[in-house]
Amino acid sequence: MIKLDEFDAVIYDMDGVIIDSEPFWKSTQIDVFNELGLDFMKIGGEKTVGLRIDEVIEYWFERHPWTKLSTSEVVRKIMSEVIRRVKEEGESKPGVIETLTFFKKHRKKIALASSSYHNLIDAVLIRLGIRDYFEVINSAEDLKYGKPHPEIYINTANSLGINPTRCLVIEDSINGIISGKAAKMQVVAIPDLSHTPDDRIILADQIEDSLLTLMRKLKS
């Protein structure tokens, strides 16, 4: 069990951890891929949960090429709809404010490291009103590789001035878990129930059902 004195910084993933946006991603990708003539779930769409959206689209285009739209047009179409839904319907996951307040009280540095693009991160932080909690906000949009590559987590630790081994990552997807572990960080997995469970989440150091459960265990 991870202890409060074992880390100096907390790095949150965003989609599925801070905001309940995974259903938006899933339904939007199903709809857009249907327009392209593909059944997103039938081809195995959940394999790419947690990847950067341009990498998701490139991954599926290589395996099931389409002709209706360019890959960049598909990315823009999906992003536009997810951002719209976040702005209109987005809700925080249980325990977000409580854990942010808890970590701040215990003088932990707090950061956000997301595969999502900056415009979606901005929409989420404005919708939830939580930007001021984060000392560092990083997007994989700026990087050569998104998750599961560890670059975003290593960069975030460097920006915080904290050794990666003293960082706690909170993730919901297997690609995010792999990214955090590859960066030599401790990782708590809080699986998003909108997706089919992935047995590989056992790679995380600890698995919880919510941020609130994690906080209660850290308190004890």
Image (tube, rainbow, N blue to C red):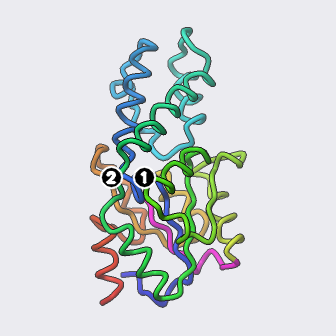
Please say whether residue 163 is one of the residues in the magenta stretch: yes
Above or below residue 69? Residue 42 is below
Residue displayed at 48% across by 64% down: 130
Where residue 120 sits, quadrant-wise, is top right
Q: What label sits on residue 173 in the rendered view?
A: 1
Check whether the beta carbons of the residues at disc 1 and disc 2 lie within 8 A of each other.
yes
Report the front residue among 202 and 17: 17
Residue under label 2, please give it.
192
Q: Which residues are magenta?
A: 161-171
Mark 1 and mark 2: Cα distance apart in space:
8 Å
Where is residue 146 drawn, in percent x and y? 62, 47
Q: In the image, which disc is placed on residue 60?
A: none
Instruction: Using the image as rendered, state which of residue 108 and residue 201 is in the foreground.
Output: 108
Dot 1 amino acid type? Ser
Name the residue type under label 2.
Answer: Asp
Drawn side of residue 219 relative to residue 149, left or right: left
Is residue 168 shown above or below 25?
A: below
Q: Specify whether 58 is left or right of 204.
A: right
